[in-house]
Amino acid sequence: MNHQLIKGIPFSTLEYAKAISLLKGWLHEQQEKPRFVVTANPEIVMSAKENTDKSKQFKKMLLSADLITADGIGVIIGSKILKGNLKERVTGADITHDLINYCNDNEYRVFLFGAAPESNKKALEKLNEQFPGAKFKGQHGFVNGEEIEEVIMKIKQFKPHLLLVGLGSPKQEEFIYENIQTLNIPLSIGIGGMIDIISGTIKRAPKIMRDTGTEWLYRLLSQPKRLKRQLVLPKFLLSVMVERMKGTPS
């Protein structure tokens, strides 16, 4: 599978239509092997590049993924700076929407792990109403280390075809990485705050902003507390520009 290295992270160069087709194929195969997908933005990339044990372990988790897609517009800009060939975002939000539709058409089971209790509950209610062909079950993300085993047992008993983990990064990637073989689910994806969007707790940016790559601005305006996180973007782009000038990928 073709990819482009950006700060040591191999991003798939597949355009959205081909990427979603690949993921549907993995769901359809089911028993071949459990698959792990990461939708990465600049914040995730930068978290994996520091010279610390924690950062190195996180990078190891990312590199174990079967597919890493460019979720943020910053990654696409970074690719262009490096003369790469990432053409469009393949976002966790869009992937989630299309795969849930696919699960609905094929009567698959979907498990949602993450978000606050009320948000997770509302998301399940909406999904059950809108997609009666699929079966949904969930667990909120407000659990401690001792309760994780109960969550794992709950997931195993449900036997989902698709596991959507919305714990935020790096917790969601860590959960999938540590439990992928035990759970043996066809497809597991970290989806950040998508459960809150499904429940209506948070609204996604208008389509015009998503299409023009300014979804980050909408998020910042609607959630000012994200400012610190958004400051990672200029640091990421500066790091990529330095890499380009040196001519050596890092």
Image: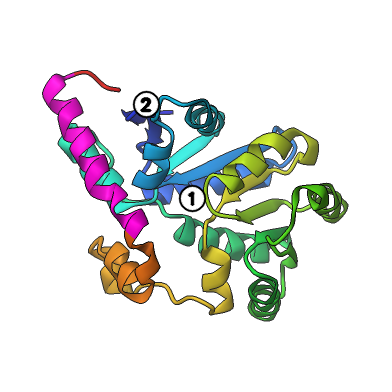
Q: How many labels were placed on the picture?
A: 2
Q: Are marks 2 and 1 in contact (CB under 8 Å)?
A: no
Q: Is residue 68 left or right of residue 99?
A: left
Q: Residue under label 1, please give it.
A: 20
Residues drawn in magenta: 228-247
Q: Amino acid at mark 2?
A: Gly
Is the residue 179 above or below the residue 207 in the image? above
- Magenta-span inclusion, residue 246: yes
Q: Name the foreground residue: 76 vs 59.
A: 59
Query: In the displayed structure, would residue 246 be above or below residue 153?
Result: above
Q: Which residue is rendered at x = 73% and y = 38% of the image?
A: 179
Expressed as whole percent of the image width and height from the top left, the position of residue 103 reads: 66, 60
Query: Which percent across, then down, holds residue 146?
Result: 82, 48
What amino acid is at disc 1? Ile
Disc 2 marks which residue?
Answer: 8
Q: Position of residue 85 (x, y in %)?
A: 25, 36
User: At x 66% / y 66%, what residue is drawn?
Assistant: 104
The residue at 70%/79% (across/down) is 125
Instruction: List x then y, in percent, for residue 72.
Output: 34, 52
The residue drawn where x is 76% and y is 47% is 145
- The answer to whether residue 87 of the structure is visible from this angle is no
